[in-house]
Amino acid sequence: MAKALFLVFVLASLDLSFCMRYTPLLGQCGPSGYLHGRTENCNRENHYNCCKGGQEYPQYHCSPEITGETHATMTINSFAKGGDGGGPSECDGNYHNDEEKVVALSTGWYNHGSRCLKHIRINANGRSVLAKVVDECDSVNGCDYSHKFQPPCPNNIVDASPAVWKALQIPKDNIGDYQITWSMA
């Protein structure tokens, strides 16, 4: 009887992971779908990629598991009014100037806002900095006006303000995509 229940549980887990594209037994997160790109007037500030017509972009509802040293790619974003971040931050409805150490997390890590206004510790370039989570880097939607015709974020993004980059003393020629580790503070 116990073996039968275990088998049912394993099969149910595999079936559920297929639908969500998250494999709990392997701790992996894969695309949950694909978004069809279209070419429009895209914001290219801060090295952003723009959607291309006919190209498909992966969508993620999940992110890799958070550990004491979660590996991620840090990108740059202005959360200021008129900046490349678009509207006000999801967590508090405010804009944040470029001197504030704030970040947006990929959809899975953002976790429906559960990390809003909490601090994370970012490690890079032999330095460490605390930054406040104020927004989501949308890993599901994109290629439209409200996302400035940029594709969905990958599932492993910490989108950081210029103040975070400055505190980590990342050389200007390395600004764009930078490999980091992070954890909850």
Image (spheres, rainbow, N blue to C red):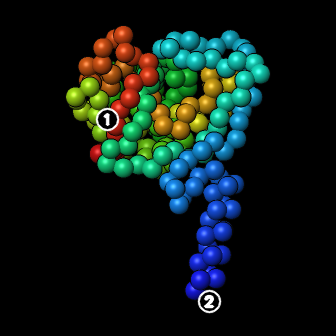
In the rendered image, which residue does mark 2 sit on? 1
Task: Report if residue 119 is visible in the image.
Answer: no
Q: In the visual, does 143 lie left or right of 117?
A: right
* Nearest to the observer: residue 114 or residue 7: 7
Q: In the visual, does 144 lie left or right of 112?
A: right
Residue at 26 percent across and 25 percent down: it is 125
| Image coords of residue 127 (percent x, y) | 22, 29
Q: How far apart are marks 2 and 1 (CA)?
A: 48 Å
The quarter holding residue 2 reads bottom right
Amino acid type indicated by mark 2: Met
Instruction: Note whether 151 is above or below 19 in the view shown.
Output: above
Q: In the visual, does 37 lie left or right of 113?
A: right
Residue at 37 percent across and 43 percent down: it is 70
Q: Residue 122 carries which label?
A: 1
Q: In the visual, does 55 lie left or right of 112?
A: right
Q: Quadrant of the C terminus?
A: top left
Q: Which mark is residue 99?
A: none
**Number of the front mark, 2 or 1:** 2
Q: In which quarter of the image is the N terminus?
A: bottom right
Residue at 63 percent across and 26 percent down: it is 151
Which residue is most to the left?
126
| Image coords of residue 181 (percent x, y) | 34, 37
Q: Mark 1: few, some, or many residues within 10 Å (few <14, many ≥20)?
A: many
Of pointers 2 and 1, the one earlier in the residue sequence = 2
SS at badge 2: loop
* Nearest to the observer: residue 40 or residue 145: 40
Q: Mark 2: few, some, or many residues within 10 Å (few <14, many ≥20)?
A: few
| Image coords of residue 134 (percent x, y) | 44, 36
